Structure formats: structure tokens, C-alpha cells
Amino acid sequence: MKKQDSQNAGERTLQLQQQILHYRSELSRMQQLVNEADNQVKKELIRNQYLQEKLNEALHTHTDQFEKEVFKLEKKVLTLEVALEEEKKRSSDLRKKLLMQEEQAKPAVIAPVIGATAHFQASILLPKEDDEPLTVFGDFVIKNTGNKPLQQPVICLQITPVSYGSLSGKIILQRKMDDTNLFDDAPGPLWRHVHENWRERVRTDGQYWLKPLKENLVEPGQTLVFSSFEISFPFPPERAAAVNGFVYAKELPNGIPSLNKISLQ
């Protein structure tokens, strides 16, 4: 759709440019007609002055004939003056139309829009044995809904109550940074912890702060997915639990919450 819109916009611009060339040519022709009419008026005024002088010299000789000639010339001059005024008006209207077409041909200025959405796609696997944990499998999907790239994306997944659940997934630990082929066959990007003291943050706040290992830019309309994560909870559940998600970027320093959350009752 965007490609088609871009193609339509290009065709519209080409049409406007062709119209502008036509109007410029027409304006040049009108200006030439105006100049010719102006010269013709000047000639007729000189001719009229000459006949007036001859009329004065002849006094009453051939008075009627001269008066008729003068009347015809005055009428012709008046006609030429009217034609000149109309050509000037047409020329002015053409200039205005040309300016309007040039304004329309200018590319539209699109205001920058910064925006994003995030949501969970998750399923719950109940254990077969009582001593096994309850497991949540899911993806956390981030989409750039603005028209500007999002730089340095960061996500925060918060499990409440604190220390009640444990998150795992395609997360590369610092000591394994050189072994990035560990998840080469798995879809989606690899992630790493934002903070070196991430374990302490998990224990105190229940927060997992993660950023992509390589993907540092989310283009407009594109998505970034923390895929195939797992969260283990005690079973049977001792209390209600929830997982909330947040998205941050250089352009979104205050972050935005996810559209949904994972709840266990």
C-alpha cells in the first residue's frame, strides 16, 4: 500500500510539473500578446495625434471626413484598450494559477510521530506431576507504530509477587557472549541483560531488563519479538501472580506498558 501511495504521489507530482510547464508557456504567450497590444495602442495614439494635427491644419476642409476617421480611430483605440485590460487580467489569473500549482507540487512535510505498542502472546502448560512447576510459554511482541525508527529498544518484564516466578529464554549471559551460535536455529533475536547486577534486580523488584544482542533499531511498521520465553511458577499456585511488560527506547525514555498482561489466579 505504501509503495502504491508513493507511486501515485510520484505520478501526481509529474502531472503537476507538466501543468506548470504548460502554464509557463501559456504565460509567456500571453505576455507577448500583452506587449503587442500595448505597442498597437501606442501606434494608434500616435496616429490619432497625427490626424488631430492634420484636422487642425485643414480647419474646416474635409471636416466631416476627418471626424469620421477620428471617430473610427477612437473606437479602435478603445477596443484595443479593452483587449489589453482583458489580456492583463488573464495573465494575472494565469500567474496565480501557476503559483498555486507550484505550491501543490511541493512535497508534503510529514510531522514526526513516535509511537509503539507491545503485547504478550502466551499459553499455560499445566504439570503432569504435583512436584513439577506450572510453565507459561510466550512471546513479547513490540511494534513501532510511529513514522520514525526506535533506537536502542529495551524491555522490562516484571513478575509479581517478587521471586514467585522464574524467567528463562533466548538470553545470553555475559560469560557466554562469545558463544552467540547457541540459538542459531531458533527464530527471533537473541537478548542480553541490561544491568550487570540483574540477579539483584530480580530478587528485589521481580524485574527482568533485557535488550537485543544485535537489533538496535526498529523501523516504522516493523516488530521486535522476545520469543519463546518460559516462566515457571509453583504448582499448585499459592497465590495470584502476574507478568507485566514495558517497552523503552531512546525516543521513549519514560516507556509504555504492554496492552495486556499474563495473569494467574
Image (cartoon, helix red, strand yellow):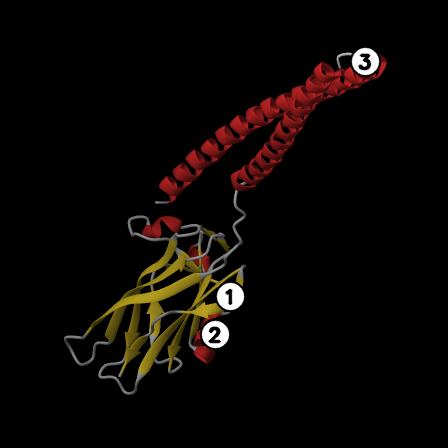
SS category of the residue bearing label 3: helix
**Residue 128: quarter of image:** bottom left
Q: Which mark is residue 54?
A: 3
Residue 119's x, y, as percent?
34, 66
Q: Residue furthest bottom?
A: 238
Q: Compared with residue 93, is residue 38 higher up or lower down, i.e. above or below?
A: above
**Which amino acid type corresponds to the residue marked 1 in the rendered image?**
His
Residue 40 in sight:
no
The tag earlier along the polypeptide, 2 or 3, is 3
Horizontal side of residue 259 vs 69, given as left or right: left
Say which residue appears at 34% left-offset and 52% top-offset. 182
Mark 2: amino acid? Arg
- Mark nearest the camera among 3 and 1 is 3
Residue marked by disc 1: 195
Closest to the camera, between mark 2 and mark 3, is 3
Decide: is 187 above or below 89.
Answer: below
For the residue pair 11 and 169, the one nearer the viewer reads as 11
Q: Earlier in the sequence, mark 3 or mark 1?
A: 3
Q: Quadrant of the C terminus?
A: bottom left
Q: Which residue occupies 44% across, 36% down?
A: 12
How far apart, in angstroms, are the residues tagged by discs 3 and 1? 106 Å
Q: Which mark is residue 201?
A: 2
Vertical order, 43 against 184 (above or below)? above
Q: Is residue 241 visible?
A: yes
Mark 3 surroundings: few (<14), some (14-19) or many (≥20) residues within 10 A: few
Residue 187 falls left or right of residue 97: left
